[in-house]
Image: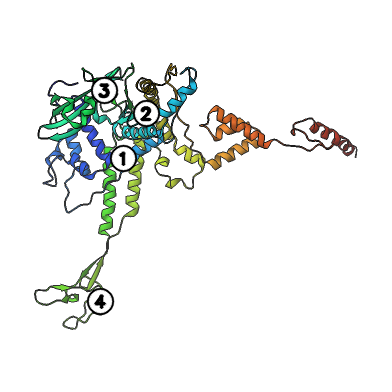
Amino acid sequence: MPDYSGEWPPKPHDLAADMYGEYTAWWSGNSDDLAEIYSRAVPSAPVRPSQLLGGVRGALSRFWWGRPVFNDTKRLHIPVAADLATMSADLLFGQPPTWLCTEETATDVKGAQDRVNTILDGADTLATLLEAAEGAAALGGTYLRLWWDESVAKKVMIGAVAPDAAVPQWRYGKLAGVTFWRIIGKDKLGTWRHLEHHEPGRIEHALYCGDDGAIGRRMPLDAMDETLWAAELVDEESSIPTGIDELTACYIPNVRPTRRWRNTPGLSPLGRSDFEGLEPLFDALDEAWSSWMRDLDLGKARLFVAQEALEDKGPGMGSSFDREQEIFTPVPGNQMLPEDGPNQLVQAQQFSIRVEEHAKTCQDLLKQILRGAGYSAADFDDADSVSMTATEVSARKDKSNQTRNRKLLYVQAELRPFGLAALRLDYKVFGGPDFGLKEAPELHFPVRVDQDPVALSTAISNLKIAQAISTETAVRMFNPNWSNDEVEEEVARILDEVALTVPDPDGGEFESAEDEPRNDFQDEVEPDVEVAEAA
């Protein structure tokens, strides 16, 4: 815990905080936040001095979102960044993973499996993992922490914390400790922050009062109503012992290496956002889409009416034009204006809308964004895959599958030991039987099935007809995420249904078509074959 009135977040995490703010603006799609981040100055002139600078500041100022707004220019934002984050979460946890206890992981396999299903396989846990995965794709990583409250649930719960609300401590790239913080109030005394520090064996709580940029001084936990609960639980060291050796938090990076902070100590293990390096493309897509919408405004039909066609309302009342009027009387002098030319009574003006040009530009920009983020266009939008075969659609999704497999490596490495910590903490807090946990339960992620079920069943049927696969292989092909027990049960049911019952010529019945009567039938037809050959 900090014991001085220093800046918060501390260095070098202040650099990460600025980048998290930019990524959050794209993720949330808030146009005001985007304009604020990229303008960095009052829009008082068409060209701001900062746009002429070099370096990062000049580059940000030259963004389309950083330009001054004149003539009520409409700026529209396409939430493609948010769609990328959502798609990443769906790829990872759209189909829930399976936790499996075996004899190698626990002595009481059945009891341990039941508790694992309660803590790690519940709907609340899956929802938390989806939330965490979306934040990881946007911000470069996510934290998971364990918490418990008997008034809420009789089990240990899992919560997700965004990386912009944490200060980590690393040891060889692994999380050794972490301090979660949140602003719980602001008053005349300053900004109040609650800090929660996790390290192996204990969780420390502290309350600080400072300002927006400094942590301030440490205050008693009972100084704010929001931390009264912690004041009643902590010991003389302001900590809550966990009773386990494992860390009650983990950090799952989105993907590594972190290109931006590769050589920055303390930041290199954070992970890389899906948005990194794509900000100019996000900006260009918004500019192209806004230009398209501007064409719609300019393309509206407008009428330019000559003075002679206006109806005088009287002195001081002005004049007007009735668009429903069908007959116009001759103008003074009995000379009608020409039907065409600059002096005609009514001129219509309607600019063309460049639909194809804008659509092609937006489509190409979107493809570049998806390729840069590591996703396939077929996963983002299936509009172009209607006439494609199942094989072509599957091939178009290979890029997303590769990205998914890469991210799952980081999830597997951190989530499995974190699950073991959750089970051991649950035993310490809530008691119950000791299942003899030896190591973390196995974690299996389902295989992503891209092929169309109709095309897959046709392929399996052709292989069966050709006697190229067995029934068990066919079941596994159609249900790749089934366990061995489920496959065996399904194979047994299929064999029972297709078993043939052949009538016995003597009045009895045979067990199946594979019994000896088939040879008797062949013996009966052999004389006819010989007669045919003699003939």
Q: Are marks 4 and 3 in contact (CB under 8 Å)?
A: no
Numbered-mark total: 4
Mark 3 or mark 1: whose residue is earlier in sequence: 1
Whichever of labels 4 and 3 marks the residue nearer the N terminus, that label is 3
- Under tag 4, what secondary structure? loop
- Mark 1 / mark 4, whichever is N-terminal: 1
The amino acid pointed to by label 2 is: Lys
Task: Identify the residue at image location x=42%, y=30%.
Answer: 121
Q: Which mark is on residue 325? A: 4
Disc nearer the start of the sequence (4/2): 2
Mark 2 = which residue? 154
Q: Secondary structure at mark 3?
A: strand
Distance of label 4 from label 2 (alpha carbons): 78 Å
Give the structural element (helix, strand or loop) at label 1: helix
Task: Name the kind of residue labelled 3 in the image.
Answer: Val
Mark in front: 3 vs 2:
2
Other-residue count near label 1 (Cα within 10 Å), few / some / many at <14 / 14–19 / ≥20: many
Q: Would you call the spot at circle 3 few (<14 residues within 10 Å), some (14-19), or many (20 or more)?
A: many
Quadrant hosting residue 56? top left
Quadrant of the snapshot with the C terminus = top right
- Residue located beneath label 1 in the image: 81
Q: Amino acid at mark 1?
A: Ala
Q: Nearer the viewer, mark 4 or mark 3?
A: 3
Q: CA distance from mark 4 to mark 3?
A: 76 Å
Q: CA distance from mark 1 to mark 2?
A: 38 Å
Residue 348 at x, y percent in the picture: 25, 67
Query: Which of the image's four quarters has the N terminus?
Result: top left
Nearer to us of marks 4 and 2 is 2
Res 133 → quadrant: top left
Residue picked out by circle 3 = 178
Q: In the image, is 376 to the left or to the right of 49?
A: right
